[in-house]
Image: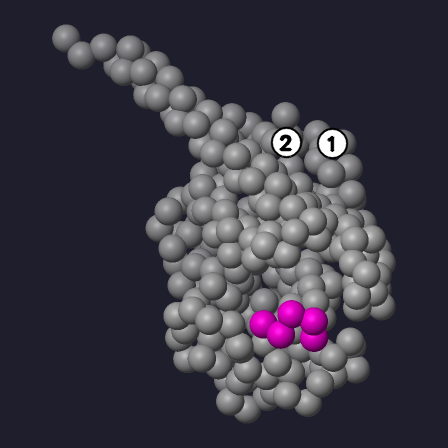
Amino acid sequence: MFDLKTSTNTNESVNLATNKILDYSKWACVLLIAICTFLMRLNINSKLNNLTWIIFMMLFIFTFVHGTQRYGMKNMLIWFAITWIVSNGFEALSIKTGFPFGNYHYTSAGPRFLDVPLLIMIAYFGLAYMSWCVAQVVTTQFSKKFVGGYKFLIPFMTAFVMSMWDLVTDPQASTIGGAWIWEKGGAYYGVPISNFFGWLLVVFIFMQIFTLFMSNKNMDISPDNITSKKSYWLQPVLLYLTLGIGVVLEGFTHTQNVEIYSSMAMVAFFTMIFVAIISMLNIKHSKELN
């Protein structure tokens, strides 16, 4: 005779074991990203300066593991497709016409689609997801469904949180590193101001599309769900904090282009670091999370 109670207990045990493995995997990604970030930003050895692709690949893996626990694999794939189509489309448009970011072209090697390196699209997705989680923590939405004005506030906040990262990394990557070239330069350490307004616009568009898509979905927001755990929300916040600290460290470790590195360190401290601290305090004092 089939024992339903035994079967249920077995399924619960399997789910707990799976979540534990996934949790270890996520923490491993956080740790590896932190190690690579600090090794690269401390400027110890020039050979370590090319760890960016490892950081973005680990962030990409973290995004799918972390996001699937809340939204499911199907919805994460849809999210990735939305992000790819919108961001790659606007990047290609800007390369050809200058709208919305400005006139630029990439110099880095590797496979491309419409003149945009594939690594850029992987980075977009990982950074967008991390910023999306941080935006929800800042607004203390956590595992709630998107209703009312939050359907528009969360994408809006995500655009600002993600653009903060670009604000403190674009001058190093383009003006100093030459990974892409701004053909007419720009007022912000060689970067045109239009680039940052372009980021706000593009990130808001693809995040707004996903938010409206997910607002009609039924998500498990029960106290027993993984998204009710403080550690679940702490992980993406620590990633954001890590990237911010990395930029701050560069302000103390470089002897060339000191003006840019020092300025970016100061801006990162008053933007990314501040947002990360607010987020951690919200998590600590949340009565919704356990």
Position above or below: 8 against 93? above
* Residue 67, visible in the rendered structure: no
Residue at disc 2, secondary structure: helix
Q: Which residues are magenta?
A: 175-179
- Determine whether, in the image, residue 191 is placed left or right of residue 53: right
Ranked by sequence position, the earlier of labels 2 and 1 is: 2
Nearest the eye: 53 or 129? 53
Residue 72 lies in quadrant: top left
Position above or below: 28 against 186? above
Nearest the eye: 119 or 101? 119
Please name the residue shown 40% across and 52% down the image. Answer: 75
* Res 102 label: none
* Residue 108, visible in the rendered structure: yes
The verdict on residue 177 being magenta is yes
- Determine whether, in the image, residue 107 is placed left or right of residue 274: left
- Residue at mark 2 to residue at mark 1: CA–CA distance: 8 Å
Position above or below: 147 against 255? above
Q: Position of residue 7 (x, y in %)?
A: 27, 16
Nearest the eye: 108 or 64? 108
For the residues labelled 2 and 1, say whether their Cβ atoms are less than 8 Å apart. Answer: yes
Q: Position of residue 198 (x, y in %)?
A: 64, 77
Please name the residue shown 39% across and 70% down the image. Answer: 111
Please name the residue shown 69% across and 49% down the image. Answer: 44
**Which amino acid, by three-letter code, is at mark 1?**
Lys
Q: Which residue is mark 2?
A: 230
Q: Which residue is mark 1?
A: 284
Residue at disc 1, secondary structure: helix
**Which amino acid, by three-letter code, is at mark 2?**
Lys
The verdict on residue 147 being magenta is no
Quadrant where the C terminus is found in the figure: top right
Quadrant where the N terminus is found in the figure: top left
